[in-house]
Amino acid sequence: MMDKRNGTLVEVLGLTKHFPIRRGLFSRVVGQVQAVTNVSFEIGVGETLGLVGESGCGKTTVGRTMLKLIEPTAGSVRFEGTEVFSLKGEAMRAMRRNMQIIFQDPYSSLNPRMTVAAIVGEALLVHGLCKNRAEMKDRVSELLDRVGLSPRYVNRYPHEFSGGQRQRIGIARALALNPRFLVCDEAVSALDVSIQAQILNIMMDLQDELRLSYLFIAHDLSVVRHISRRIAVMYLGQIVELAEAETLFREPAHPYTRALLSAIPVPDPKRRPQRILLKGDVPTPIHPPPGCRFHTRCPEVLDRCRSEVPPTYDLGGGHRCACWLLEGQAPALEASRTVGSASLPGESP
């Protein structure tokens, strides 16, 4: 369970994002891509929440919608009690100083026509944190030093750096406004393993130093386990399980979580768990299956899974899972959301 001594920094309630499908001369809406449906969780001060799942399950959409880079369809995001989605103009601009993002691709996320000083320092000038360009360059030099880059690089361009160095520049840019919350969208997935370790160590050191809170989006469970305190597992736009990292790896409750964990490479063949192979492909988010969305691929599917949405079961210690297999083993959560819970399939926020 999340440590309440640190307090809740970000609270997500019933977050939903459906993208309209338009066709015809008048762009008539003919359907919806249900990218994210009724997702809720909390992130404490100085905490890292890992968000994992297959490609296309809605992880990135959750992160970008939280920051209002994408307009939500429904739901609420509260930063220290302030409703983010209701903010506009100058109020939203001020809120963006507290909430930043590290993008996945270090190659496409940096403007090739701008120097490092301009890339990292642009926000400082926009928000009036530096009086002139000389002061901006000094601040950029400090940020580069903090992420392990030489201050001499301020006048270089992105093409002069390696992938790991570019990602460090992206981290420096995200830290420029002294934010308190960072969405790390596959921040190390495009990097070599040795570089991944360096970037993760930098992020954890910065978290300890600045008490940063992270939403760490990834598909590599080994990386997520290393950096996250709690982990939420997504499937087809919904969270199916949420627990402390060690609890999730030791006692996974959802069949989908068990399948993900069985795919993690293990150096010792004798300790390798039996691989759980999921049949078929992930259903389209345009027409998600009725009942449990995982039932079309679940190796333990029950008849009721095909028609009835499973409730959310409380397994104790902040461990929550939505699966009919848990019926009778744990109490089902009430429809009303409780503190520290995650809104899962079948739960109203």
Image (tube, helix red, strand yellow):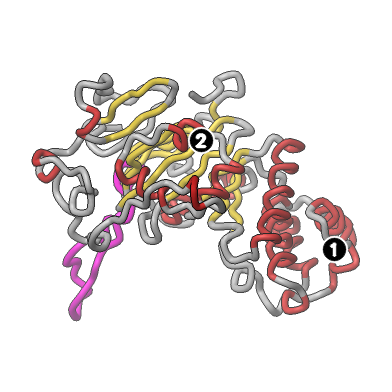
Q: Is residue 343 left or right of residue 45?
A: left
Rounded to the nearest whole Å, what is the CA distance between mark 2 and mark 1? 44 Å
Q: Which mark is residue 245?
A: 2
Which residue shows up at 57% across the image and 52% down it? 184
**Is 34 colored magenta in this rendering?**
yes
Residue 152: which quarter of the image? Answer: bottom right
Reply above or below: 145 against 214.
below
Nearer the viewer's eye, disc 2 or disc 1? Answer: 2
| SS at circle 2 | helix
Residue 103: which quarter of the image? Answer: bottom right
Q: Position of residue 215 (x, y in %)?
A: 54, 44
Decide if residue 51 is in sight here: yes
Region rendered in magenta: 15-38
Which residue shows up at 51% across the image and 35% down it? 245
First in residue order: circle 2 vs circle 1: 1
Task: Please name the amino acid that badge 1 sits on.
Answer: Arg
Reply above or below: 242 against 291.
above
SS assignment for the magenta stretch, majority: strand
Residue identifier under label 1: 133
Would you say the residues marked 2 and 1 are in contact, meaning their CB atoms lie under 8 Å apart?
no
Which residue shows up at 24% across the image and 35% down it? 323
Q: Nearer the viewer, residue 112 or 246?
A: 246
Q: Position of residue 329 (x, y in %)?
A: 25, 22
Query: Callout 2: 10 Å neighbours few (<14), some, many (20+)?
Result: many
